[in-house]
Image (cartoon, helix red, strand yellow):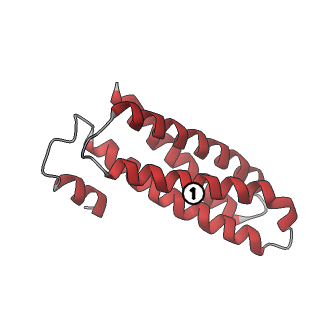
Amino acid sequence: MSTAATMLDSYPKDLGGLDTGKLTACIEACIECAQACTACADACLSEDSVAELINCIRTDLDCADICDTTGRVLSRRTGYDADLTRSVLETCAAACKSCGDECAQHASHHAHCKTCAEACRRCEQACRELIGSLD
């Protein structure tokens, strides 16, 4: 069992009717994506063609920040606000789509961009699945 799952399972109150499996998967995908995007931006900065990767770096860093924030917001269950959660998830899904699309453009030349694009796609999907369970 993952740390996120263990923490959610040990929460002393009701989780507000959220699907615990989808919530756990989304938290984990956000954390993984934030790490992948941070590492991808750093790898892009080490490439000889760094000037061609400026948009990728910016998108990576934006996505990393948004995913980190989303994972943290989802981890806090006290005073749960469904509207805020939905808004944060929609923003995260949009950032992941944008970053995944950008990194996919460089994936054939840079393995780190391929890995990052895949992490972004997984996180986008996890956010959309959790959004779907909020209704």
Q: Is residue 41 left or right of residue 79?
A: right
Q: Is residue 123 left or right of residue 84?
A: right
Q: Nearer the viewer, residue 133 or 74?
A: 74
Label 1 secondary element: helix
Residue shown at 76%/75% (left/top)? 46
Q: Nearer the viewer, residue 133 or 81?
A: 81
- Can residue 107 be seen from the camera position used here? no
* Among the 4 quarters of the image, the one containing residue 97: top right
Q: Position of residue 5 (x, y in %)?
A: 26, 56
* Among the 4 quarters of the image, the one containing residue 3: bottom left
Q: Nearer the viewer, residue 129 or 55?
A: 55
- Can residue 129 be seen from the camera position used here? yes
Residue shown at 52%/57% (left/top)? 33
Residue shown at 34%/32% (left/top)? 82
Q: Quadrant of the N terminus?
A: bottom left
Q: Quadrant of the C terminus?
A: top left
Q: Amino acid at mark 1?
A: Ala
In the image, farthest residue toward the top: 135
Give the answer, above or below, for where 129 lies relative to 75.
above
Q: Is residue 13 left or right of residue 82?
A: left
Q: Position of residue 4 (x, y in %)?
A: 30, 58
Q: Which residue is mark 1?
A: 64
